[in-house]
Image (cartoon, rainbow, N blue to C red):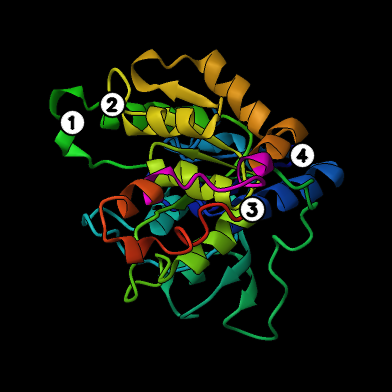
Amino acid sequence: MTPARVLLTGWFSFLRGEVTAGDALAADVVGHALRRAGLVCDTAWSPAFRPDALHLDALDPARYTHLVFACGPVHSRRPPDGGPSPLLALHDRFPAARRIAVGVSVPDPDDPAVRRFHTVLPRDGTGRPAADLSLPAPVPPALPLVGVVLTGGQHEYGARRRHAEVSRTLGAWLAGSGVARLPLDTRLDSRDWRLPATPDELHTVLARLDAVVTTRLHGLVLALRAGTPALAVDPVEGGAKVSAQAAALGWPAVLRGEELRPADFHHWLDWCLSDTGRARARAVTAGPVDGTLLWRLLAHLPAGARTGGPAGADAPR
């Protein structure tokens, strides 16, 4: 008798398939259960998502006695580019394997992609709903939450701009930094729910972060105003307003875009996430606010406008 060998698949297995966090966790849960039961189990991943993993195109279907399709909807729709239905192609590729769908949604029980499974164990669509397979996945320790505030504008700096290059470099480093990333923007918009409508909304988010990585002046200033350390990167060659603002605030975690090095990035990100970095951020706004610009403005206005001094210029925060 041929020993059982299971291939674990899902939408996460297809080149043009979508890999969601829920699907990936469901794959971990199912794979763990199969291996604990003593079954030999391989998992096929999309080469676009995990280039170094096992891929459908590179394996021998004859090796597998069973195929398990986990999570997601079961349907035979074709992709937008007009290619073949991924699920029907999967059935065709493994005609000799016993094919089982588990934890799936079944929009149409008569769909050929559904009927060609030998067994369907749905989470919804037919019968009594079942809890999603991602639910019992172990809950990991919380990762640092880092807001990312980048800009692709500032064309006034002309040939000195390094914005696109800096954003690509920071994005690659952040992807492998072991932190949770939250993209943010300092731009306000009362019509778009994805953007803050008021400064108070942005402040609320910034205050809950562990750190910020930014190429924007106000990404730096408003993070520190919220007591959150910021790793500022000046995207203008030779330094411009981001570097100048860091100097004005006495903030050390600032890098120049044309001199970016991985070691410096990771050093200052670690520093921002440390107790020392957070204490330094709080200290920036703990003392009197610098009112120099307000005093200079009032010096150019009639004397009556200067009565009492600029509001808040000397008030501690």
The answer to whether residue 303 is visible is yes
Determine whether, in the image, residue 304 is placed left or right of residue 110. Answer: left
Q: Nearer the viewer, residue 311 or 225?
A: 311
The amino acid type, in three-letter code, at marker 2 is Val
Q: CA distance from mark 4 to mark 1?
A: 72 Å
Q: How many marks?
A: 4
Question: Where is residue 19 shown, x and y percent of the image?
Answer: 50, 50
- Near-viewer residue (185 or 169): 185
Residue nearest the observer in this picture, 259 or 44: 259
The Cα atoms of the two marked residues, 3 and 1, are separated by 35 Å
Q: Earlier in the sequence, mark 4 or mark 1?
A: 4
The residue identified by callout 4 is: 1
The disc at residue 157 is 1
Q: Residues within 10 Å of mark 2 (few under 14, many from 20)?
A: many
Q: Secondary structure at mark 1?
A: helix
Estimate the spatial distance between the alpha carbons at disc 2 and disc 1, rounded to whole Å.
7 Å
SS type, badge 4: loop
Rounded to the nearest whole Å, what is the CA distance between mark 4 and mark 3?
A: 80 Å
Using the numbered discs, state the Cα–Cα distance from disc 2 to disc 3 in whole angstroms. Answer: 33 Å
Q: Residues within 10 Å of mark 1 (few under 14, many from 20)?
A: few
Q: Which amino acid, mark 1? A: Tyr
Give the secondary structure at mark 2: loop
Find disc 3 in the rendering and name its residue: 316
- Farthest residue to the bottom: give it: 127
The percent coordinates of residue 227 (x first, y second) are 64, 48
Q: Which residue is mark 2?
A: 236
Find out whether the residues at labels 3 and 1 contact each other: C-beta distance under 8 Å.
no
Q: Can the viewer see residue 73?
A: no
Q: Dividing the image into 4 quarters, which one contains the N terminus?
A: top right
Mark with earlier residue (2, 3): 2
Q: Are marks 2 and 1 in contact (CB under 8 Å)?
A: yes
Image location (x, y in percent) of residue 201:
51, 68
